[in-house]
Amino acid sequence: MDRSRRLRLIGLAIVTGLMALATWYALQALGRLGQAQSQAALARSELTQLRGLLPAIEQHERYARDGEDIKVMIGKAGFDPARWANRKLQRAAALLPRKDAETLLVQQIGANGAQWFAADYFDVSVASAGAGLFTPATPDDRGFNVEMAGVLYFPLVGK
């Protein structure tokens, strides 16, 4: 074989080897690119979820700050939290005569307003079509429909 032909074949083999190496490197880079794109999509999804949670987190922070402000106000007013207790209260919707509904509602503030009810849910409605919440009972009055849920706070006596 002629020397120039041999050099061309060697050059062709080297170029073919370099092209194979470049192809392998490009395929590896494409694989890494796919992984990076997948990670970026996952990060975007997590970012969207976190942005959705941000308002709730900010609201919890406001509640915590408000709670601290209330504790400071209670301290300034001279109330001792150790002298108070609380009970969860939940009453399903029920039809009550006006007098019983009035008694139930008065019990939520206690004697002389000594206790208080922090409502999570509170609903009082009249059961008769012509009746009103703040008007005297009519002869056909069926009372009130009362439903409530929340926490009742009351002072401990004798501490």
Image: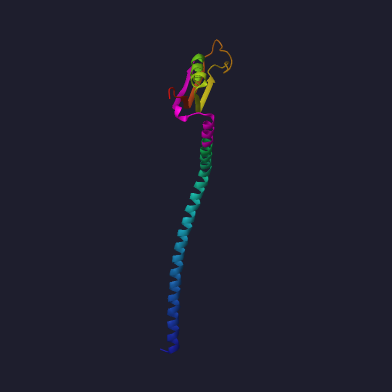
Which quarter of the figure is the N terminus placed in? bottom left
- Residue at 45% over, 25% down: 89
Which quarter of the figure is the C terminus placed in? top left
Its colouring scheme is: rainbow
Residue that protrudes farthest toward the bottom in the picture: 2
Residue that protrudes farthest toward the left in the picture: 1
- Residue at 46% over, 56% down: 39
In the picture shown, does residue 126 fall above or below 75? above
In the picture shown, does residue 87 fall above or below 15? above
- Residue at 51% over, 50% down: 47
* Viewer-proximal residue among 155 and 130: 155
> Is 75 inside the magenta-drawn segment?
yes
> Is 80 inside the magenta-drawn segment?
yes
In the picture shown, does residue 61 fall above or below 17? above
**Residue 5 location (% of width, % of height):** 44, 86
**Residue 4 location (% of width, % of height):** 45, 88
Q: How many marks on residues?
A: 0
**Residue 93 location (% of width, % of height):** 47, 23
Report the magenta residues as a range.
Answer: 68-96
* Viewer-proximal residue among 128 and 77: 77
